[in-house]
């Protein structure tokens, strides 16, 4: 697993594993049968979209009244990001949003998921809003409509004003008030136009990466900080859902979770138990309290520490019935029992198992998507699932104006087939968002790992649709 956006999850398993550029060098192409798919197999109402996030694309980090965010701050400190890169400019979406939304249309997607930068909207965290920041998102939303694209707003995709981070960020219970004020403001501002909302992106990633493993902003490493931040994020997730529902007439409100399909390395009891602990930490910890089931302490006893941070009424406050749950899936993790504190498990990486992996060391394992969807479908409280992120990073070569990204194309076909399999087995999964329309800034990995359907030359900002993007263009026609 990776020490980055997708979770820094590995460190839940191990404090010291290193995942790097362990690309499978000898990958010779597909040993798999060609996957035949038709758009109509997914049904007429299936939602086809692409997903991106503010910090990874916008740039304009201090433009027009935007304040410094925790991610600006973190990336500006030497040693936090590969090659000391930062997203001050990123893909310059702040200035090139029109071109990028047109590219999304060109590839025949009709839904665009993007996030709002809190520091652009409320530079002081709370209080006086920044009109220029709000206007920027109006322009993005209007451009979507002009292109026949439905906007899907993620309210929180990991960046918060640095002033709030300095006041403790997610570890400070005051965040409930700060976050609610932000959600009130954006839902009142955009709610008349935008109906599709997601409160959060992957709590595990920003809570774990930010406060336990330290590979994400703000780079802290403490078990108690993690527990506090986790509980406050769970409270804010539900609170945010309530605010969206109250303020947005006809809202379709959801939230998204990091997932990984977890398997024990073999059938020994100790490894099966290790897999149960990891599954609880990765796939269950944030969703189960929301569904009224509490934290999965029985499977991962360290989670009982969260109780210390409960206040009267929290048990009810952390529950909310979202219209949909966003599942984000990238890979399978195979684990075995180990001495690592709390989790007592470690990942047996894709490299160790000698299976195909991408530029971040993630195994390509489409069956995991079918299984994780089925796992989530077992929660009867969930009305509907959407795959709100799925994608892969492989080293792209721009040659004669073309990127022949065969592996990425295959990745998508196989994961779509896996989704369809879950759908055919009765899972109510209604949409699929590709991560990501363009290459962008991949958190602590910087610009090395490219996930886009569109190649971006980060020197010139030139965009080129990759073969995978052209494949979607045809497929979605
Ligand atoms: C997910 C994040 C997203 C991006 C992808 C590759 O975990 O939500 O921002 O980094 O991974």
Image (spheres, rainbow, N blue to C red):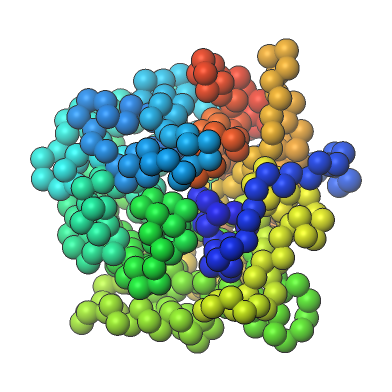
Toward the left, the furthest residue is 128
Instruction: Please determine whether, in this image, residue 21 is positioned above or below residue 419.
Output: above
Question: 392 or 11: which is nearer to us?
Answer: 11
Q: Residue at x 86, y 41 (%)?
A: 26
The location of residue 35, given as percent across then percent down, is 80, 43
Instruction: Please determine whether, in this image, residue 476 is positioned above or below residue 347.
Output: above
Instruction: Please determine whether, in this image, residue 72 is positioned above or below residue 330.
Output: above
User: Is residue 438 visible to the viewer in this orientation of the structure?
Assistant: yes
Number of callouts in the render? Answer: 0
Question: 335 or 203: which is nearer to us?
Answer: 335
The answer to whether residue 238 is left or right of residue 360 is left
The location of residue 279, given as percent across then percent down, is 58, 72
Toward the front, the furthest residue is 78
The answer to whether residue 39 is left or right of residue 447 is right
The location of residue 188, given as percent across then percent down, is 19, 44
The location of residue 249, given as percent across then percent down, is 25, 49
Question: 194 or 113: which is nearer to us?
Answer: 113
Q: Residue at x 39, y 68 (%)?
A: 222
Q: Residue at x 17, y 59 (%)?
A: 177
User: Is residue 417 visible to the viewer in this orientation of the structure?
Assistant: no
């Amino acid at each position: 697993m990776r020490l980055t956006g997708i979770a820094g999850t590995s460190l839940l398993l191990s404090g010291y594993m290193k995942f790097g550029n362990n690309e499978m060098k000898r990958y010779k192409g597909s040993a798999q049968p060609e996957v035949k798919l038709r758009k109509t197999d997914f049904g007429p109402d299936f939602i086809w979209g692409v997903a991106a996030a503010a910090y990874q694309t916008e740039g304009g980090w201090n433009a027009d009244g935007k304040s410094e965010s925790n991610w600006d701050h973190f990336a500006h400190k030497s040693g936090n990001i590969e090659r000391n890169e930062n997203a001050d400019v990123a893909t310059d979406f702040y200035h090139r949003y029109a071109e990028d939304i047109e590219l999304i249309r060109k590839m025949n997607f009709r839904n665009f998921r993007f996030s709002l930068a809190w520091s652009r909207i409320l530079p002081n965290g709370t209080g006086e809003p920044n009109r220029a920041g709000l206007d920027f998102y109006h322009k993005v939303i209007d451009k979507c409509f002009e292109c026949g694209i439905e906007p899907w707003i993620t309210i929180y995709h990991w960046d918060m004003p640095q002033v709030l981070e300095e006041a403790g960020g997610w570890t400070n219970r005051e965040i409930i008030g700060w976050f609610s004020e932000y959600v009130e403001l954006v839902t009142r501002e955009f709610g008349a136009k935008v109906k599709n909302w997601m409160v959060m992106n992957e709590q595990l990633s920003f809570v774990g990466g930010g406060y336990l493993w330290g590979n994400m902003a703000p780079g802290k490493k403490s078990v108690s900080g993690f527990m506090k931040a986790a509980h406050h994020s769970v409270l804010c997730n539900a609170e945010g859902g309530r605010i969206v529902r109250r303020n947005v007439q006809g809202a379709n409100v959801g939230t998204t979770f990091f997932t990984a399909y977890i398997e024990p390395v073999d059938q020994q009891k100790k490894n099966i138990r290790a897999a149960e602990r990891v599954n609880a930490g990765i796939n269950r910890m944030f969703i189960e309290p929301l569904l009224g089931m509490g934290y999965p302490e029985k499977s991962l006893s360290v989670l009982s520490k969260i109780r210390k941070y409960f206040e009267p009424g929290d048990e009810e406050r952390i529950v909310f019935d979202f219209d949909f749950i966003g599942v984000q899936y990238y890979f399978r993790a195979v684990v075995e029992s180990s001495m690592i504190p709390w989790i007592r498990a470690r990942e047996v990486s894709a490299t160790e198992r000698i299976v195909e992996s991408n530029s971040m060391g993630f195994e390509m394992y489409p069956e995991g998507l079918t299984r994780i969807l089925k796992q989530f479908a077992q929660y009867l409280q969930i009305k509907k699932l959407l795959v709100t992120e799925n994608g892969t990073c492989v080293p792209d070569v721009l040659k004669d104006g073309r990127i022949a990204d065969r592996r990425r194309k295959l990745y998508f076909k196989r994961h779509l087939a896996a989704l369809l399999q879950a759908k055919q087995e009765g899972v109510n999964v209604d949409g699929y968002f590709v991560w990501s329309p363009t290459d962008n800034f991949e958190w602590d990995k910087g610009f090395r790992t490219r996930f886009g359907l569109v190649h971006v030359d980060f020197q010139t900002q030139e965009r080129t649709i990759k073969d995978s993007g052209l494949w979607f263009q045809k497929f979605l026609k």
